[in-house]
Image (cartoon, grey):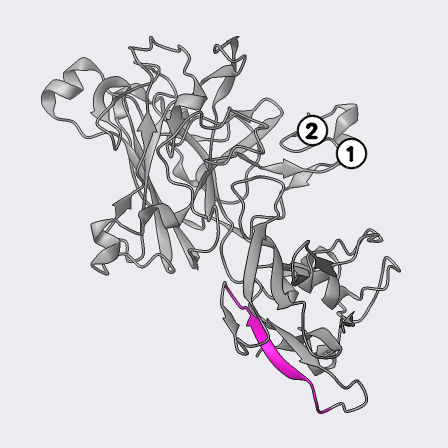
């Protein structure tokens, strides 16, 4: 843990003077490597020297580079709450729901299938297959994507009019619950215009907030992001039946792609239909992004002493943790800086991870460096998306930029405290990190 010794002053600056995207829009993200897509940029399951989303092939030379599971994920589904497949279209080998637990593997065969529906099933009123997974610690509603679901969609040989590769992907709705009884479904879009034959292809840029549009298998691993903020206006949330800061259940409901099921706009949803063997959507893993994090949890990769500066860059490990730095690489850029614009304003920037739960960032000001008691707090940040301006006369606002590698990730941030430029005399600013029990 970070002890009291971590209450240090990490920055002095001298001034010397005389979103949330809605879901309705296109194109949505491609099936992989679409980091800048503002709606639903896919999140890589693996990262490292081989590149984002690359899973080293077993026994290959690439395996030595050891791409690893993306550290952005703080947890994975822990237990199977329920599993109800459509049995005739699922061979027994694909009926092991525990394969959806734990970290992503990028293995297209490490999945559980929910089963597709045949014509007779529609006539008999059979319900689509579904799988509900539970989490020992809740998923919270923070900035951007809060969790990601990994299906085993595969890349197709054909492309859309913009040159984006189509995918073979079986789609499913996603629902969440805080009590395991009351569920709310993510609003979704699917504007595929016509029937898709068995093992046919879909254009992922026409699909949003449905599992099954991102590649995960055959050395590619990308998850579909879901942002709990998309549910803020839903009745179950407004009425208090679902607490978006205490999500402990994620339910996947298969969409048999004949066109009988519709998206949130009333469009018929088409995907490859019908499918057999591993019929219906195939779930590999569900990764948690938005959850409180402590130094001890962050330090599991062998970095355990908060005061050690292992990479000799001037930042001990507790500062690497606080300011989103890499403790194994000497950082050349500062984690905090002052910036002036063309007008009458200054910005004090710093990096943070919104999920940090054991630190308070306190921005302070003084006009007298000699008097150690003269520092006054003007703004505070954390934990878990909390922020407050405590001296409005000294702060003109706060600006937050999402700074993750994918546009869908909002918990990795660059924060600016907006400061007046025209003041009487000098001002000195600092950021103090205050440990929280």
Residue 116, position as x, y percentages in the image: 29, 21
Residue 406, position as x, y percentages in the image: 58, 39
Q: Is residue 179 above or below residue 420?
A: above
Residue at horizontal 52 percent and vertical 62 percent from the top: 292
Q: Closer to the N terminus: mark 1 or mark 2?
A: 2
- Could you tell me which quadrant the C terminus lies in? bottom right
- Seen from the viewer's position, the closer of residues 207 and 151 is 207
Q: CA distance from mark 1 to mark 2?
A: 8 Å
Q: Is residue 98 above or below residue 242?
A: above
329 to the left or right of 429: right
Discs 1, 2 touching: Cβ within 8 Å = yes
Residue at horizontal 38 percent and vertical 49 percent from the top: 228
Q: Is residue 426 above or below residue 124?
A: below
Task: Please check the rendered image and state whether residue 100 is part of the magenta-colored stretch, yes or no.
Answer: no
**Is residue 54 in view?**
yes
Label 2: few (<14), some or many (≥20) within 10 Å?
A: many
- Reading the image, the residue beneath label 2 is 56
Label 1: few (<14), some or many (≥20) within 10 Å?
A: few
Residue 341, position as x, y percentages in the image: 68, 55
- Seen from the viewer's position, the closer of residues 172 and 191 is 191
Total number of numbered discs in the rendering: 2
Q: Work out which residue is located at the far left of the displayed protein and give it.
A: 124
Q: Which mark is residue 222?
A: none
Which portion, as a residue range, is magenta? 373-384
Residue 410, position as x, y percentages in the image: 53, 49
- Quick one: SS at disc 2? loop
- Reading the image, the residue beneath label 1 is 65
- Seen from the viewer's position, the closer of residues 204 and 156 is 204
Task: Please check the rendered image and state whether residue 376 is part of the magenta-colored stretch, yes or no.
Answer: yes
- Quick one: SS at disc 1? helix
**Is residue 114 in view?**
no
């Amino acid at each position: 843990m970070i002890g009291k010794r971590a209450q240090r002053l990490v920055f002095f600056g001298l001034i010397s003077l005389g979103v949330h995207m809605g879901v309705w829009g296109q194109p949505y993200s491609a099936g992989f490597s679409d980091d800048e897509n503002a709606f639903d940029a896919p999140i890589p399951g693996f990262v490292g020297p081989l590149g984002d989303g690359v899973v080293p092939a077993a026994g290959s030379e690439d395996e030595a580079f050891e791409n690893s599971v993306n550290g952005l994920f703080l947890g994975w589904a822990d237990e199977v709450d329920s599993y109800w497949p459509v049995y005739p279209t699922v061979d027994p080998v694909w009926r092991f729901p525990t394969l959806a637990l734990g970290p992503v593997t990028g293995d297209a065969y490490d999945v559980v299938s929910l089963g597709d529906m045949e014509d007779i099933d529609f006539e008999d009123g059979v319900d689509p297959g579904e799988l509900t997974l539970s989490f020992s610690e809740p998923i919270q509603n923070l900035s951007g994507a809060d969790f990601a679901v990994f299906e085993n969609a595969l890349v197709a040989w054909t492309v859309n009019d913009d040159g984006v590769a189509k995918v073979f992907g079986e789609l499913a709705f996603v629902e969440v619950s805080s009590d395991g009884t009351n569920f709310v479904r993510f609003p979704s879009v699917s504007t595929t215009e016509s029937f898709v034959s068995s093992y046919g292809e879909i254009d992922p840029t026409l699909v949003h907030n449905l599992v099954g549009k991102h590649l995960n298998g055959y050395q590619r691993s990308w998850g579909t992001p879901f942002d709990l903020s998309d549910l803020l206006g839903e009745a179950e949330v407004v009425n208090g039946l679902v607490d978006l800061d205490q999500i402990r259940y994620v339910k996947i409901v298969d969409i048999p792609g004949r066109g009988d099921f519709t998206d949130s706009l009333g469009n018929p949803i088409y995907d490859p239909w019908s499918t057999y063997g591993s019929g219906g959507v195939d779930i590999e893993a569900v990764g948690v992004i938005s959850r409180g994090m402590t130094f001890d949890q962050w330090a599991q990769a062998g970095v355990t002493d908060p005061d050690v500066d292992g990479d000799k860059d001037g930042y001990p490990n507790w500062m690497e943790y606080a300011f989103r730095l890499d403790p194994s690489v000497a950082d050349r850029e500062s984690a905090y800086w002052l910036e002036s614009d063309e007008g009458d304003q200054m910005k004090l920037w710093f990096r943070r991870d919104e999920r940090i739960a054991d630190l308070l960032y306190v921005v302070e000001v003084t006009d007298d460096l000699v008097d150690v008691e003269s520092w006054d707090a003007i703004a505070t940040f954390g934990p878990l998306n909390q922020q407050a301006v405590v001296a409005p006369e000294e702060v003109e606002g706060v600006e937050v930029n999402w700074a993750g590698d994918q546009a869908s990730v909002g918990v990795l941030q660059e924060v600016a405290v907006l400061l007046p430029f025209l003041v009487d005399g000098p001002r000195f600013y600092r950021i103090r990190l205050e440990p929280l029990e």
